[in-house]
Amino acid sequence: MFETIRNAWKIIDLRKKLIYTFVLLVIFRLGSCIPVPLLDPEQMKALFSTENSMFGFIDLVSGGAFQNATIFAMSITPYINSSIIMQLLCVAIPALERMQKEGEDGRKKIAQMMRYGTVILALIQAVGLYFLLDSYNAVTNPGWTSAVVVITTFTAGTAFLMWLGEQITEKGVGNGISLIIFAGIVSRLPSMFTSLWAYVQSGSLNWLGVVALLILALVVVGVVVTMNEAERRIPVQYAKRVVGRKMYGGQSTHIPIKVAAAGVIPIIFAMSIMAFPGTIASFFGVQPGQEGFWGSFLWAFSTQSWIYAVLYFLLIIFFTYFYTAIQFNPIEMSNNMKKNGGFIPGIRPGRPTSEYISKVLSRITLAGAVFLAVIAVLPIFMNLGLNISNFAIGGTSILIVVGVALETVKDLESQMLMRHYKGFLE
């Protein structure tokens, strides 16, 4: 990875992109330190005084901005929710599906709808968040003026983060939204180590447990890297054909199908969905474990519940299949191979080919989905056994950080390769 970054730094164009990306990420971190007017940060921290807080995911991806009541408190979660809704709608509504297949213009229209959806969801979340803070006496001067200022600031902060992410994707290196989440998680590493040290000092965890956790983290990183690079190659043979006096075809190639083709997207989607019910319930002052139906319901969606772990596991598998189905279309792949005279050895062209690709894709996706789900859920059960709060977030953090780092490095390598080919052609 460091070798790739060093080689990219030697190319002037890529160096500018790296600097541009770094500057925008610095702006994100600086904005995470600017407090929202008319809010009391100490009262905001009261929301995190219990282990059962339902705002862990928001605070995780915001790099602590939510807990400190800053302008980026809601982070990029409304954009994630808007993205989930739009992708589901593109599958359910034929008009949107056709628009998505129209090429660049169709994708631009979908992206524009996603931006509008982000602002609407951010506004709704900001309104609910204001009333929650008001119930905790975190608003210094309650009233309609304070409501307008706080709600507008929260919404504008999310809209600005969305713009930052799009600028990084367009003019920088890697996926901007993923890098913002990456930067937020990495910024929490010092506090995670501080919390681990506090557990050691309090006697909740001994040094043997610390060593075991560090070894487990290294093993998880190694497994994540291995699974991200693993792929199933379906052999493809192209028949020979004579055009004029020249013979074409006769080549052997393959279709690479990655085991973890969906990357970290299913984890981010699943975390966002699981945090949504608890977030909405907390807006009305309901806390996990509280007497009554809603208290029990909210407890089921806290990281202290095995129900949360099971639902989280199933959602990751669902979103892995869903995202892979969007990326791969076996029927379209089979038709393209047939048009170009290609076939899979031992498989008839047409429908048998598409069915074979679907079967292979289903099996590979299952392996990748179970891998992601086990790595994400295992720390939750360890958390329940060791009684270490927020450790469950650490396992998912490793998946996101490693996945985003690998994707960014691959993007750098592809851009370097493109420039090398361009140099040869010129």
Image (cartoon, grey):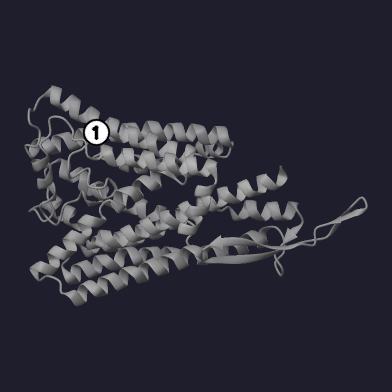
x, y percent for residue 417: 60, 51
x, y percent for residue 132: 14, 38
x, y percent for residue 351: 67, 58
Indicate whether 396 appears above or below 279: below
Horizontal arrangement in the rendering, residue 94 relative to residue 114 (left or right): right
Residue, x 35% and y 52% (percent of image)?
268
Horizontal arrangement in the rendering, residue 324 relative to residue 212 (left or right): right
Indicate whether 372 appears above or below 244: below
Residue 75 shows in the view: no
Indicate whether 133 appears above or below 400: above
Q: Closest to the observer: 348 or 70?
A: 70
Residue, x 53% and y 48% (percent of image)?
10
Q: Closest to the observer: 344 or 73?
A: 73
Q: Closest to the observer: 41 or 58?
A: 41
Residue 143 shows in the view: yes
Q: Residues within 10 Å of mark 1 (few under 14, many from 20)?
A: many
Horizontal arrangement in the rendering, residue 283 relative to residue 117 (left or right): left
Residue located beneath label 1 in the image = 154
Indicate whether 389 appears above or below 9: below
The three-letter code of the residue at mark 1 reads: Phe
Q: Residue furthest right?
A: 245
